[in-house]
Amino acid sequence: MVAKLCVSVSVACALAFSQAQVDLSGTVKDAKSGTPISGASVALRGLAISATTDADGRFALSGSAGLKRGSHLLGVPDPRSLSFRLESRERVVVRILDLSGRERATVFSGELESGVWEVAPPSLPAGMYFCSFESSRSRRSVRFLSRTDERAATSEGPGVKFRQESDGVSMRSAASAPVDTLIVEKNGYRTAKVAMAEYKKAGLEILLDDTGTVDAKMATIVPDPSWPCYMPDGIPPPSLGTAVFGITLQIGGIHDVGLTKFGKRRQYDIRGGAVAGDKFSGTVLTGALDYDLTLSNGSVEIEQIAIIKAGSIPILMRNAGVAPVGGKEARMVLDFEAPNSSSYAWLNTGKFAAVRVVDTVAKTIRLDVYDISKVTLPATRVQIKDPAGVTNQTWDCVTLTGGQGASVFTETVTLGSSVSIGASKRGSRNIIPITGGTTSGKVVGKILDGGADYQLSGLDARYTLAPNDGEFIIVRNCGSNGLVPVFEARVDGPYAFLNEVKYLSSSPNMVGSGVSITFYEKK
């Protein structure tokens, strides 16, 4: 009979492998001191699930997760290892199924003598598949990973081939081997890779070794000129200043955009929050955005944009931050636009800095804010230098001239009630929240609830597209004399064509409770 390899083949079996129930928890600590490490990224290589350690170094991964694009799980045979054994002459059908249970090919159908038989699958696109063995006595399957479109087993084409083996070893099962790898990363530490034999385990303790990089905690961090963070001469350690207030942002969603033209992009959707301090307290309105960019050399650039209500007074907050290569914390510089006529006008002229702490377990981003107006920059300096040959993300709107060519896609955007800052340090600011919408054309999907049009001397809209295929596209569409959009999409994804700065936008046209905007190729 066919050797036992896996559970019976069915669509349910296929779906069980494409979705994994995860329940992992533990603590990440410094290997030398044993102290907990906060802000470490903990992710499963093969599944679309991750977390960040809290202030006590704890993490928890739970829920149902699917395979990531391009994932390579451990313990999964490649096509060259596929084989099965028959104890007697039988009729056998060998089929290839995808993860949805759909048949991709019949490799063999007919009678075979007893012995060990190798399977040569047909040419398959890269990805995960099942090889199903059906005989009169059993029906079994095993998953395997195809890494290329080339025929993997032999040059003789798909089929089965007799293999002379005295012991008749059959295909190994992935069940007893590691199913995945836990990747733990933190600036200033070496990446840890922990093989996982199962997706349910508590009490894991992961130790990280320090890279030996100079600790930037008490040094002046000098940003790259492309991302000056309001302080091109350097950002001092915030704690050298005077504590003034704290800000807690509530994370509503995390979107891994992927590797874009700027770097590895992650976006946090903010669903409210609070400001607490003696001179400044209030609430953070839902719809705020936190953009996290990790460059190829390991340095980090961050942008945050939010609306705060101090009682009935609206205040715009737009922060910029950095973490150097090997740095263990992200340092933020905060900028506020409060009405000049309000009691919060002092925010317009202040100098404020904070350390950003992301806690995906508690679903918060914490900023303990210090007044650094009287701080002298420490002599020890850490200079951030962006990697060569990589496009720098821009802080200001992009300008582009030309006429409208072929239509690319159209948005119908729903809007919330406008928030007027009024006269402030940069002029008169009016903000119109973006609450959703749809897209049609070469991008078909929806617009996420979040972001806004932060109007000043012109339009400046920040928001995110969510096409129906699971991708994310970050959009900034702005200008005072013609709108020029800048799109940020995955460089190896279906919308990579949008990464080129060669598009123009129509002006918004009122449609119901929102506006319609069409994007064109520049001609």
Image (tube, rainbow, N blue to C red):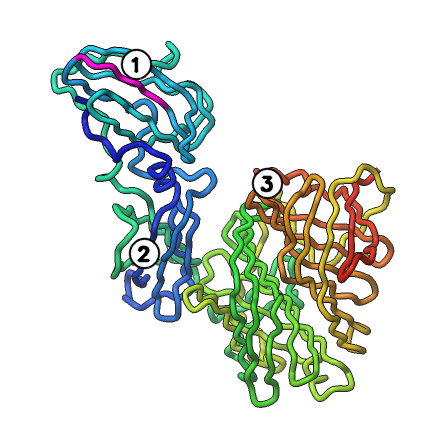
Side of 326 where 376 appears, left or right: right
Residue at image point 52% right, 75% down:
248
Q: Are marks 2 and 1 in contact (CB under 8 Å)?
A: no
Side of 449 where 349 appears, left or right: right
Dot 1 lies on which element? Answer: strand
Give the residue pinned by disc 3: 491
Q: Mark 2 belongs to which amino acid? A: Asp
Across and down, in percent, residue 275 comes to: 57, 80
Most extreme residue toward the front, as rendered? 136
Q: Mark 3 belongs to which amino acid? A: Val
> Which badge, 3 or 1, is on the more N-terminal residue?
1
Q: Residues within 10 Å of mark 3 (few under 14, many from 20)?
A: some
Highlighted magenta segment, given as a residue range: 89-95
Across and down, in percent, residue 437 comes to: 68, 55
* Location of residue 229 (image quadrant): bottom right
Side of 129 where 310 appears, left or right: right
Name the chief secondary structure element in magenta: strand
Residue at image point 52% right, 60% down:
253
Which label was assigned to residue 23? Answer: 2
Location of the N terminus by quadrant is top left
